[in-house]
Amino acid sequence: MNSKRTTPTLQDVANATSVSTATVSRYLNFPDQVAERTRKKVAKAIRDLGYSPNFGAKAMAARRTNTIGAIIPTMENAVFARGLQAFQDELRLHGFTMLVASTSYRPDIEEEQIRTLVARGADALLLIGHARNPEVYRFLKAQNVPTLVTWAFDAGSKRPSVGFDNRAAMREMATKVIGLGHRRLALISAETAMNDRAEARRVGIQDAMATAGLDVKDLKVVETTYGIEEGAAAFEQVMTSTSDTTAVFCGNDVLAVGALHRARDLGISVPRDVSVVGFDDIELAQVTYPPLTTVHVPHREMGRQAGLALTKLVKDGMAPEATELKTRIVFRGTLAPVNTS
Amino acid sequence: MNSKRTTPTLQDVANATSVSTATVSRYLNFPDQVAERTRKKVAKAIRDLGYSPNFGAKAMAARRTNTIGAIIPTMENAVFARGLQAFQDELRLHGFTMLVASTSYRPDIEEEQIRTLVARGADALLLIGHARNPEVYRFLKAQNVPTLVTWAFDAGSKRPSVGFDNRAAMREMATKVIGLGHRRLALISAETAMNDRAEARRVGIQDAMATAGLDVKDLKVVETTYGIEEGAAAFEQVMTSTSDTTAVFCGNDVLAVGALHRARDLGISVPRDVSVVGFDDIELAQVTYPPLTTVHVPHREMGRQAGLALTKLVKDGMAPEATELKTRIVFRGTLAPVNTS
DNA sequence: TTGGAAAATGCAAGCCTTTACATTTTGCGA
DNA sequence: TCGCAAAATGTAAAGGCTTGCATTTTCCAA
């Protein structure tokens, strides 16, 4: 009969049922507002026609997509993969879907991705860290897309965030390290350009140094991109350019693993000759030899809470309160008192 | 001035520019059809207003979302994270965005997620492995959503896929291992329920055993869920329940890392007392001690090619041809000839 | 100059749902 | 049986973009 085979619409269902589109729509969204008899008829028609609501039309009419975007540096970094997974699980629980984009730590790509996800109908956005071109925040505001910052917590910021205090966490670690007698310190840092977390971690160490009466300038800092091999190279650079370093902080566990590996190759014993500490506490940290002393960050919990906060925000328009998560130091085998022999 | 703060629309941009909405739309979608002068004006207005196209309206008018869904077991598994990242990067190059869902290796959740992503307007879907309820494939067909299977390659299947031959890869590894004199073999396998890859890898070992005249039944198999700790426990189980095992295959590198770790704790020397081999070749494999001998899988390349195939499919309706990627064995330190002493 | 093709722009009809508001039907106490 | 509130359903107006077709502008050869 109908020669042009086109996918059935609400209208088709309505016609087939001798009912209005409004009723079919209500059947779909608020079934209990529809009489039993009608419900049956509509259900049948939908089944017979193989009807499925058109997403675009639905999104347009409802002004909502039930989709939340997440923009992270890269999924290859286990900490983000972990957080994102937990985030996604939480969203699913509340009927939301996750749109993902990654930036490779590049601000320009991040900006592009923010615009892309907004254009793709994200009802809200998850972002990592606060540092960002103000224009981006203006855009987000103009678009009326609520945003949650995570992986960082800044009591001073007005933007809602779920995260932890990178600076304080590293300060605590540094205090321990210094307490063990270490005076000649080095840091293998992730790149700090547009990465407020890496920056904060460095400052945390310097806080502790200052408190201990050390000269902040004496912290030997090497910046490097993310990766095991990069960490290894940076470690070698630190050890060859300074002769008296006794403790090496690493901006994250992956760098630390690289450092540990290179130390072995170089015949440097950890922790006897030099102590090494990481940050994040990914699985990896438990299976290095010796196991890595590091700062434990509750990545999953962070992702979960971010998911919860964002769904609440979208559903009830409830602005989430800033949530600070606690980190803690996990002592394993790579940190020891300075070797005075 | 304008008291009702509402997000700007195409119309607003058109008004601000004294141009028609059609022109603005063309500026957005086919910039070279718009005169230079006009382009400048429109660009400015868009920036000033913070305009971003409304997704629902766009999807509805264009009958396309430019969104592609990916459904994987979990992002916490580095191999998927890696592949997904490459997939995403490729999609971005072609103007597509990625929708992600994960299944925790559960078929029921996978089915739910497939329906969710289709309902969310995914133009196409990326799926892992072939094994799947036939009804799902029927649904996908009815909804007219093209699908690409990856992480597995099966010449016999009609479904387009970009992947590698799990069975042949493991067979090759097993052949090497047996060639080194190993006769008492064990496998720590990922769970095989609904996981055709894990299954194929086991069969690959048994192929090699059969060829070498070994009894396929003699392969000691322990199935376990994913995780370092799980791999460790499985290894212990293998070593305590059999006394003569000289080579332990692991379904993936993470399990192998666990095994290696437990071996150390148990005072078992690898590879002197027992050889251990993995599968995947994730970063981790290079920094264990000894470094892990494993099957290298080109995860990134796979993700990239999958992205390419899928964008082509959606853009030009070109059904992708099945693509087989090559794996190769990476010899490092955990495989040695059987110890005959 | 001028005519005409090509380039640029405009017009307006969809695309498919949701939802405020209006209308009809139902159910039940009096 | 009537009247009325509640329940069910209908009407029709958005909602913002794309695109086929129509119109205007630009450009260039003659």
Image (cartoon, coloured by chain):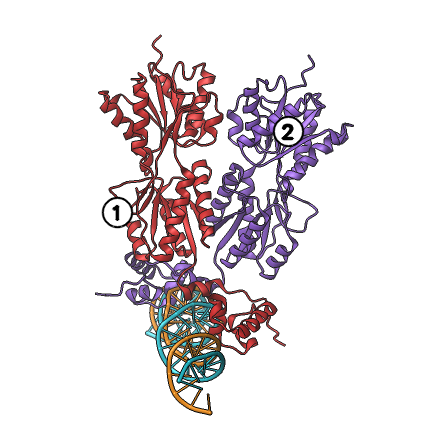
Chain colours: A red, B purple, C cyan, D orange
Confirm whether residue A74 shows in the render: no
Residue on which the image places disc 2: B249
Picture layout, residue A77 above or below residue B26: above
Amino acid type of the residue tagged 1 in the rendering = Lys
Q: Residue at x 39, y 59 (%)?
A: B28
Circle number at residue B233: none
Residue on which the image places disc 1: A158
The part of the image, by quadrant, that contains residue A78 is: top left
Query: On the picture, is D4 further left or further right than B325?
Result: left
The part of the image, by quadrant, that contains residue A51 is: bottom right
Q: Secondary structure at mark 2?
A: strand
Q: Which residue ends up furthest to the top in the rendered image?
A: A341
Do badges 2 and 1 share one subunit? no
**How far, Cα to Cα, is label 2 from label 1?**
53 Å
Q: Residue at x 46, y 67 (%)?
A: A30
Question: What is the chain identity of the residue bearing mark 2?
Answer: B
* Residue A53, position as x, y percentages in the image: 51, 65
Q: Which quarter shows the C terminus of chain A? A: top left
Picture layout, residue A193 above or below residue B139: above
The answer to which of A143 and B252 lies nearer the viewer is B252
Question: What is the chain identity of the residue bearing mark 1?
Answer: A
Amino acid type of the residue tagged 2 in the rendering = Phe
* Residue D9, position as x, y percentages in the image: 48, 77
Q: Which quarter shows the N terminus of chain A? A: bottom right
